[in-house]
Amino acid sequence: MKYKINNLEQYEEQYQEALSKPKEFWNKIAQEFSWSKKWTEVCEFDMINAEFSWFKNAKTNITENCIDRHLKDKGSQTALIFEPNAPKDKAEHISYNELHKRVCKMANALLALDVKKGDRVAIYLPMIPELSIVVLACARIGAIHSVIFAGFSSSALAARINDASCKIVVTADGGFRGNKTIDLKSIVDEALKDCPCVQHVIVAERTKTEVKMHPSRDNYLNDLLQNASEVHEAEPMDAEDPLFILYTSGSTGKPKGMVHTVGGYMVYTAYTFKNVFAYEQGDVYWCTADIGWITGHSYILYGPLLNGATSILFEGVPTFPNPGRFWDVVDKFGVNQFYTAPTAIRALAKESLEYVERYKLSSLKVIGSVGEPINEEAWQWYHKNIGKGNCPIVDTWWQTETGGILISPIPHVSPQIPTYATTPLPGIQPILMDNSGAEIKESEGEGRLCIKYPWPSIARTIWGDHKRYKETYFSAYPGYYFTGDGARRNKDEMYRITGRVDDVIIVSGHNLGTAPIEDAINEHDEIAESAIVGFPHDIKGNALYGFVTTKSDIKDEEQLKKDINALISAKIGPIAKLDKIQFTSGLPKTRSGKIMRRILRKIAEGNLSDFGDISTLLNPEVVKQIKDGRDA
Ligand code: WT7
């Protein structure tokens, strides 16, 4: 990557160039990749109808850029280090040469099952090397991967498989997470009762637990690989062919399958990885996310591999076998860039400092944060104890929809301000909108965060529902991409993200829509209605509070609370369970029948007065009742 930003002057230069001549700017950056055919147009877009194309008519394959391109110079360099869940198990180092072989073999195994370019492949795997290899193999043959986080329940999995009519599901017998074992194959079996589109299941072996194999449908991965050749020529893909679908929650019960395409995603994740993490050849980089989320797609796999980096895949959890695990792994591999979530930082900061002090952590150069706002206390703890006061913290703001990081400090270039994601990267034009829908022109201000101009890795659509894509992101402020976040800008034009302004709540860094949770609860026979809000939580950032009305008198409140959480676990996954549940006789509503969540949020936070304007409230008597019966 030539376009490394080394100082403030270079940042200003690139930012100005991307602002005044965006096409020239991205044209230059895209030259660094290998394309079998160049583009006829750098970018075409329509921000009203939400249509974008980058590097139009160009041909490439992202895996050629992630792998083949590096074989000549760094074939024997480690591409991926797999650190297993149990520290006593040996780590696996996969060189670029070996990655090439394994991806080609996997590509041929998929082809043998008749997976074709454009087919959708659901991937429901733990964080084992096969996960990366299947993802890359799909990209290599032009199949569209849809990775579904292996913590999702069978019905959440089924909904995602059906939404994209996936032909194949790749899973494992089971997965290890801390001291738990999760029976992934049986979750898949349950899901597939409702998925007629699936023709084959591929089962990787991890836990060696016994699984039921359906003879005509299921195949062990190892059997398929045995007959597969190590030679495979990457499928030439159009820059605008879909690379993957990744689901995110939204304001209805149906998850949104965000679609990212090959060319723009490749260029943008490579450019941002290089600059945000100041990655230099030979560095060991570690992002603790799961590949089931966008962070893992862009900054465990694609971004690092496009830069020929060494990237760690970690199967475990931060607290197993003890809260020193992250720091143990940092010292073990001499990690130079470490990227994690505020919820993990807060959880580890609560533990004894001895877990940190056992380790040197002297290899660290840059430490990062992603997924939710990082509070000042967590920022300071991270800076002092992990960064030892001399590692810049990159507080990176972005979304599944943005494909890559949009606002972040650049190490040793941007100033450090705790809790601020600071400045937009070159090519990104953030703006703030006030309540009346007008742009806030002054430097200082607080409003809704929008982006004015497209960047290469902006999602192209919601799978199968372009209308919803347009409505969700491009209709609140016509002509602009609306992020769903609020932000504050200081006098130096630095951004601080304040949190979601829509009905998405971020719990432990997981993006949860309130609607799907309410839908799950409302399926219970005894439940009439429910409303979910977030309230501040020391470790998770936010936790969930449910206000629930029942159809008739409740016999056993504790049992019903348990049933509700069991239902949520089954429909969505344990990450969406409620911390607090309050049964009420009604919910505060406006005259037009909308639940006044603002009031419920205040009550959940413990703020029992100051409800603002309640003149449109239909049933004020309910509010008093809810206040009195608060689940404290
Ligand atoms: C939402 C997107 C992008 C990778 C992980 C989450 C919140 C993300 C930050 C940050 C404050 C952040 C936003 C955003 N968020 N990073 N550095 N500071 N908030 O992806 O699940 O699509 O969630 O995460 O609210 O909209 P996602």
Image: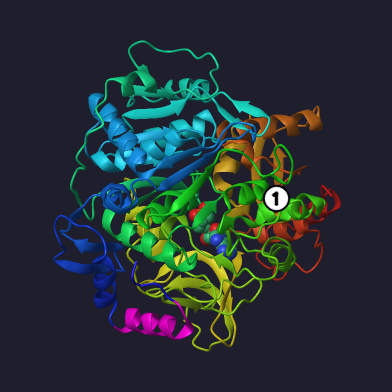
Which of the image's four quarters has the N terminus?
Answer: bottom left
Residue 383's x, y, as percent? 69, 66
Which residue is found at the position 84% from the left and 50% from the top? 632
- The reply to whether residue 503 is in sight is no
Viewer-nearest residue: 548 or 121: 121
The residue lying at 51 percent from left, 28 percent from top is 154
Left or right of 326 in this view: 202 = left
The answer to whether residue 503 is magenta is no
Q: Tell me which colouring the rendered structure shows.
A: rainbow
Task: Residue 280: give x, y in percent of width and height.
Answer: 45, 63
Q: Is residue 412 left or right of residue 147?
A: right
Q: Which residue is mark 1?
A: 543
Q: Ligand 1, what quadrant?
A: bottom right
User: What amino acid type is highlighted by mark number 1?
Assistant: Ala
- Say which quarter of the image contains residue 29: bottom left
Which range of residues does the magenta coloring cover? 6-20
User: Can residue 289 be seen at all in this image of the molecule?
Assistant: yes
Local secondary structure at mark 1: strand
The mark total stands at: 1
In depth, the one of 103 and 350 nearer the eye is: 103
| Badge 1: residue crowd in 10 Å (few <14, some 14–19, many ≥20) | many
Q: Residue furthest top?
A: 215
Instruction: Return the residue nearer the eye: 438 or 621.
Output: 438
Query: What secondary structure is the magenta-colored segment mainly?
Result: helix
For the residue pair 43 and 224, the one nearer the viewer reads as: 224
Residue 360 drawn at (x, y percent)? 70, 56
Q: Quadrant of residue 197?
A: top left
Q: Is residue 305 left or right of residue 55?
A: right
Picture residue at 37% right of the left edge, 58% below the top? 307
